[in-house]
Each structure stands twice: as structure tokens, then as C-alpha cells.
Image (tube, helix red, strand yellow):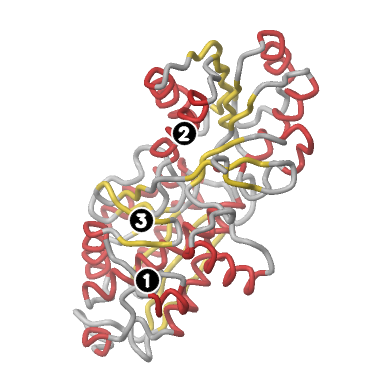
Amino acid sequence: MLKMTAALAGMAMLAACGGGTGAAAQNAGGEGGIASNIKLMGVYDTTGPVAYAGVGASKGMKLAMEEIEKQAFLGPDVKLTLDEVDTAGAIERASSEVSRAIADSEVKAIFGPVSGQQAATVAPIVEQAGVPTIFNQAGSEGVVIGDFTFRGTAPMYSYYDIAAKYLADKGLTDVAVIYNGTFPTFAEIGQKEFPRLAGEHGLTVSSSYAVQSNTQDFTAQAQEIAAKKPDAVVLLLIAPQAVTALTQLGQAGYEGQTVGSSVQAAGNVAQAGEHAAGLVYPVDFSAAQDDETAVKFVEEFTKKYGKAPDQYAAEGYDSMWWLARAIKASGDSSRAGIQKGLQKVAAEGFEGVMGDLTFEGNDLRVKGVLVQWDGSKERLATE
């Protein structure tokens, strides 16, 4: 695991670990060297229901790019550029824009869609074309499928165990689940992973409700749950749905523990007001974390954007540094060089703002943290 010196910690919030130019960085230009201008393409939602993920990742990536250039991490004259296009929730647009990026030989790597459905659609396209593509979010199956597809977000199910353990430790063993059955990430957790985790931790899923992505009224489910009075309710819903469900659960008189997902992070539940207070959810990063790396990242991000980063920004930030490390590791900014470098860095792991980053193949893993929304801000649930 790469570690950062104290001096670098002050400069680059740990992400600049291993800084310097290196001989390979001086070889600007041709195949086998690092070009002076490395063009990247971002194809993800910046409008629509999951825009918060795309916008957050974009901000994190841009902060990382500024640091990479400022530190001459890849060489004194090397510049990363990122062109972005909004997929606006449309699978067809994601496919066409990714195909356009592939056709542009100047594009050396792609940051792919944040939506699982879009990502699973374009993954075979970039894999066949041999263009290294890093996906943020997009936690469903069928995304990391070969040597050229990578994920800079740990799948939600891989750290949801900390939520199940929290319920078990609190003695909250009778659990109801409401999940979005058309959103692949939530369907996977609601149908498969959480029932498995419940069994491992001695929890009982006494009722389970599948809803659609366009479901906007949870009155029936809320009233039934309030009548049954389970110890806890797990909500696996996109951000607007969770606000409605929390509000209607409160209005129905439910007073038990509510559990969400990382989608509810960074104030996405604030509109639910008092009904969201006490909600806990596992995340891969929270601005409430108090380790030095996270604190420095929050400071720099807030200085640039005027607000604290969310987990999507942290994912984008670490992903861009993964790519920069990859180029440096291979000494080659071509598509093939970046692909080899990404795999090399993944095999070793590194430390980012999300903590110690390890990988299963090309797929990121983190320990995660459990946070609680107190009605106005996040705090660590373990405090």
C-alpha cells in the first residue's frame, strides 16, 4: 500500500503520493511516452435524477487535475484535459457519446456513466474498442467486465455490511425493506445482498416492498410498516424517493430506526426535515470524517467550491489520481499504456481520500463508514 510522507500530506492531501516528474514523464509525445496534452472524456449525467453523482464526481476530478498539473506530477509541461457531455439519463445518448469518444483518437481514456444501466450498456463497447474507462457509481453487475473497464467506486453492497452490523449491535433485528426494483444497484441489495447480510447478523426481513423508479407515493407501504412496527426500515431508493418515503413514514407514525444508502448522503435528505433525523447510512466517504487526509481534502474542496465535498466528489478525485498514477506507473499515456498502468496501480492499491483503496481485479473496495443525519448535518454514527 502506497503511503504518503508528511510533507506531501500538506501539499496534496495524500493523493499526490509519489510526486515528482520522473524520466518517463519527460518523454512527451510518442507511443511509449507521456504526451504533453492528454485528452480525457467524461460521459455521465449532469442533469436529471442522478445528476448529483455526475456533478459531484466532475468537481472532484477537476480539483485533482489542478493538483496534478500544479505539482508537475506527470512532468513540468504535461496537462490533462477533460471534455464532458451530459447523458441526461438517456442510455442511447450514453452509447452514442461513448462511441464518439472512441472514434476520436485523441481521447486516451473515458470516465463513464454514473448510472448502472448506462454503464452496463457502454461497458462492452469500450471493452471491445480497447479504451480504458473508469466508472464512478454504476455499482451494478455487468460494468467491470474485462481488461479495459474499471470502477472507482466500491459497489454499495461491498460495504453495506456495516449497516447490518449496526442494526444487530443495537438489537434492531426485525427489519422491513423498501427498494427500487428497477435501479440495478438497489435491486441487487434489496433482493440478494441485504437478505444475505441479515442472515449473517441474525436479522429478520419481515417485509419487503419493491417499487419502481417512477414511484412517488409510499403511503400504502408507510401505513403498513407503521402498523407492523418493525425495529428498522431499510430504504434503498433514489434521492427524491427517499425524501418522500421518510416523510410519509413519519406522517404514518413510524418511530423506529431508518436506514438509507450513500444516495442519501451530503444533505440529499434535508428536504424531509424532522422525518430524516436519526437516519443512518453507509458511505464510502463523508465530510464528517476526521482523519488527516479527509480533513485536508475537505479544506481544499471547500476553498475551491464554497461547500464541503460529498462522496461523489471524493470518488471522482481518487479516480483521477488513479489515472494519473497509472500514466506515471506505465510511463505511457496511450490507451494501452493507461490500461496497463491502471491495472498495475490496482494490483498494488493506494491511499486516497476515501482511505486505503484496494481492488478486486479492476474494481475498487473500501471499508466505508456509517454516518447519521442529525436533521441538519452528517456525523459519524460510531461517535
Q: Residue at x 45, y 29 (%)?
A: 165
On screen, residue 235 versus residue 244, left or right, reads: left
Question: Image quarter for residue 342?
Answer: bottom left
* Residue that badge 1 annotates: 107
Please provide percent x and percent y for residue 339: 25, 63
**Which residue ends up furthest to the top in the rendered image?**
228
Q: In x, y percent, where is residue 277?
A: 72, 36
Circle nearer the N terminus (1, 3): 1
Q: Amino acid at mark 1?
A: Val
Which residue is under mark 2? 184
Q: Is residue 9 visible?
A: yes
Given the image, on which type of amino acid does mark 3 rest? Asp
Q: x, y (%) of residue 279? A: 65, 34
Residue placed under numbered mark 3 in the picture:
356
At mark 2, the secondary structure is: helix
Which residue does the image show at 47% across and 77% down from the upper left? 10
Who is closer to the viewer here, 158 or 373?
373
Q: Tell me what residue is drawn at x 48 percent, y 64 percent.
A: 292
Q: Amino acid at mark 2?
A: Pro
Please name whichever residue, 262 or 132, is drawn nearer the observer in this view of the structure.
262
Choose mark 2 or mark 1, whichever is in front: 2
- Cβ–Cβ under 8 Å for marks 2 and 3: no
For this rendering, which residue is in front, 251 or 89?
A: 251
| Image quarter (top left, top right, bottom left or bottom right) of the C terminus | top right
